[in-house]
Image (tube, rainbow, N blue to C red):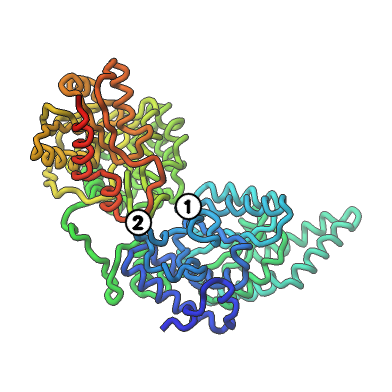
């Protein structure tokens, strides 16, 4: 029975609890999170680690007047439960349910919709500056994990915030290390002194007094600061942040809710940038998540008793990502020039096997997609063959680097673009629906998409032999159970293939839509409509010879893609037909709508937008019925 949690409809109710009741509330929150994520899947480990931190923030601050900006949002489940969303929490990550990340449309306690890393400090600094410009009051707090701090944007924001000297609190949640008792005790004692209001008032008054001493003031002040920094440098790892212009406090035990509350109550009165460094344990309170935090970072539903992740109904069928990982090991075994680069997604891109077998040729640059791409340009220029494996939605962050550092240089870098198209329950921040648009117009860059898992394997082999920038995009999905074999089928760059002949119309599909289009053609045949199916394979370059031959044989073309309609594959086909003067051809483009795709199961979303065999069949029937 969640006695305390039952009483909390919002932060105001939390403040009615006594301080010594908060540890019990933390237990209840953890139980609610575990029970829910076991059914829905989600970011369990990091959210369990941030329970006490969430409690302390809402116990001390006055949200939503005070702004709490969560970086990425992996840690925010307890925050959601404390801000009036408990009644919907069991809908977490479900279609039309509660988002798995902070969402501005969901609650006034979420200033931003987030899902990408390293953004919180920039956003929080903007809020703090706007607060001061508009004569408002209130606290602004950014909560960022140590992983997100590896992104360059976070350091840019720290540097700017330290220069501006605005009142701002950054909470750095470090969850990759444990606190030894000695360091923890010393740090806790020191922080009780450093955050004490009396200490900070005296410190400020003393600084003002010293500065007024003629001739010797600046020198004495410098000596005093060096003495303070020397002491803190011996006891805490905060000198770096102090040099950036922040007052640093920590590291403190992020699971000691009383200490967190005490620290936050003191630092909110400091009128300059403050960084509070807390240490937490990923998966705190659930043994299996504590032992395997990576497994429970973004987990499938699981059995609470055993910690075993529940299998997909097609668990014996390889995913596209698994095929990529296996093929990379095979190719690299035969070619010592191949190196792999990823951005904090070793497990997500299934490169663990590559990393283990070729540790000197594997590079995880952490959450630094821009660096990953430009780093790959140097690898390629130096004679290696880099394969950069990044999710479609995260590769957006390196758009300029793809243009300037790879394509302009015409370097042989391979982009393995995972999670292309509809991703599912992670929602609009993670749907990879824009990559055709942001890659298709870049000179020198070849863009391809496999129709099935076997073709992904063949395409990957072709990219290794290609002397120039090239990208493969593939979905977060299981394949079709096609046997891989041991060799590779040749893929001609820019070459499409006819997978089904037909005389009435042609369906030109790319990537994940090839198999559904083939199934749709079979259904149409049962209703007397003979449809050809083309596997386009390439967004760029298009197989213009084949397209022209197809256009000469039919009056109707249907393009199908798992991408937004605007600037996608269908748009390039239309452009080609216009260029060859075939405006007489009727074209229907089937694609995702030009909007941010919501969260929900991948199969459900594809059905909703008509990108299934049945949906394609019905769309074809509708346009075919209007033929002249």
Viewer-side residue, 398 vs 65: 65
**Mark 2 vs 1, N-terminal side:** 1
Q: Is residue 337 visible?
A: no
Q: Is residue 163 visible?
A: yes
Where residue 351 appears, as percent x and y from the top left, is 30, 50
Identify residue for label 2: 425
Viewer-side residue, 121 vs 349: 121
Label 1: how many Cα within 10 Å (few below 14, some 14–19, many 20+): many
Viewer-side residue, 564 vs 50: 564
User: Residue at position x 50%, y 63% from top?
Assistant: 174
Question: Which one is in front in this view, the residue at disc 2 or the one at disc 1?
Answer: 2
Where residue 39 appears, as percent x and y from the top left, is 31, 68
Q: Quadrant of residue 292?
A: bottom left
Which dot marks residue 117?
1
Q: CA distance from mark 2 to mark 1?
A: 18 Å
**Quadrant in the picture for the N terminus:** bottom left
- Count of marks placed on residues: 2
**Quadrant in the picture for the C terminus:** top left
User: Residue at position x 44%, y 81% from top?
Assistant: 2
Which dot marks residue 527?
none
Where residue 455 appears, as percent x and y from the top left, is 19, 39
């Amino acid at each position: 029975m969640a006695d305390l949690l039952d009483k909390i409809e919002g932060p105001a109710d939390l403040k009615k609890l006594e301080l010594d009741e908060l540890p019990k509330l933390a237990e209840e929150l953890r139980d609610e999170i575990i029970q829910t994520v076991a059914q829905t899947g989600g970011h369990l480990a990091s959210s369990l680690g941030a329970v006490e931190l969430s409690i302390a923030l809402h116990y001390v601050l006055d949200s939503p007047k005070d702004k709490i900006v969560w970086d990425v949002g992996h840690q925010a489940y307890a925050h959601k439960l404390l801000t009036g969303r408990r009644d919907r929490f069991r809908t977490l990550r479900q279609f039309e349910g509660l988002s798995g990340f902070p969402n501005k449309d969901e609650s006034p306690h979420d200033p931003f919709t987030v899902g990408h890393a390293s953004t919180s400090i920039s956003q929080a600094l903007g809020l703090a500056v706007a607060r001061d410009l508009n004569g408002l009051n209130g606290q602004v707090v950014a909560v960022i994990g140590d992983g997100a701090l590896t992104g360059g944007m976070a350091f840019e924001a720290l540097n700017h915030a330290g220069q501006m000297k605005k009142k701002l609190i950054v909470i750095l949640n470090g969850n990759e290390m444990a606190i030894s008792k000695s360091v923890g005790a010393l740090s806790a004692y020191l922080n009780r002194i450093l955050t004490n209001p009396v200490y900070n008032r005296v410190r400020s008054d003393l600084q003002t007094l010293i500065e007024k001493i003629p001739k010797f003031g600046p020198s004495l002040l410098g000596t005093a600061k060096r003495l303070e920094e020397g002491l803190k440098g011996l006891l805490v790892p905060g000198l770096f942040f102090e040099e950036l212009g922040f007052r640093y406090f920590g590291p403190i035990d992020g699971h000691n809710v009383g200490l967190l509350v005490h620290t936050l109550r003191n630092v909110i009165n400091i009128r300059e940038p403050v960084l509070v460094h807390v240490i937490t344990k990923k998966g705190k309170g659930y043994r299996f998540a504590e032992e395997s935090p990576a497994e429970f970072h973004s987990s499938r539903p699981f059995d609470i008793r055993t910690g075993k992740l529940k299998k997909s109904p097609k668990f014996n069928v390889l995913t596209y990502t698994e095929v990529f990982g296996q093929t990379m090991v095979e190719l690299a075994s035969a070619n010592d020039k191949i190196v792999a680069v990823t951005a904090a997604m070793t497990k997500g891109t299934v490169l663990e096997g590559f990393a283990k077998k070729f540790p000197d040729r594997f590079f995880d640059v952490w959450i630094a997609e821009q660096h990953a791409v430009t780093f790959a340009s140097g690898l390629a220029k130096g004679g290696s063959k880099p394969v950069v494996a990044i999710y479609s939605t995260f590769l957006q962050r390196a758009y300029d680097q793809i243009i300037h550092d790879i394509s302009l240089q015409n370097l042989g870098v391979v982009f393995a673009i995972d999670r292309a198209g509809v991703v599912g329950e992670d929602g609009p921040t993670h749907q990879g629906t824009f990559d055709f648009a942001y890659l298709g117009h870049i000179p020198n860059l070849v863009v391809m998409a496999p129709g099935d898992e076997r073709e992904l394997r063949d395409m990957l082999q072709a990219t290794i032999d290609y002397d120039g920038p090239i990208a493969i995009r593939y979905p977060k999905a299981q394949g079709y159970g096609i046997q891989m074999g041991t060799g590779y089928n040749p893929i001609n760059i820019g070459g499409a293939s006819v997978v089904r002949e037909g005389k009435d119309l042609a369906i030109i599909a790319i990537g994940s839509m090839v198999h559904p289009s083939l199934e749709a053609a079979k259904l149409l045949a049962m209703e007397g409509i003979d449809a050809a199916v083309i596997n386009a394979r390439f967004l760029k370059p298009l197989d213009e010879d084949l397209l022209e031959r197809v256009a000469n044989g039919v009056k109707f073309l249907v393009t199908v893609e798992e991408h937004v309609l605007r600037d996608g594959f269908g748009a390039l086909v239309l452009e080609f037909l216009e260029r060859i003067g075939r405006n007489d051809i009727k074209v229907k483009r089937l694609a995702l709508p030009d909007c941010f795709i919501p969260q929900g199961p991948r199969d459900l979303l594809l059905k909703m937008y008509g990108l299934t065999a049945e949906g394609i069949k019905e769309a074809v029937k509708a346009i075919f019925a209007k033929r002249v």
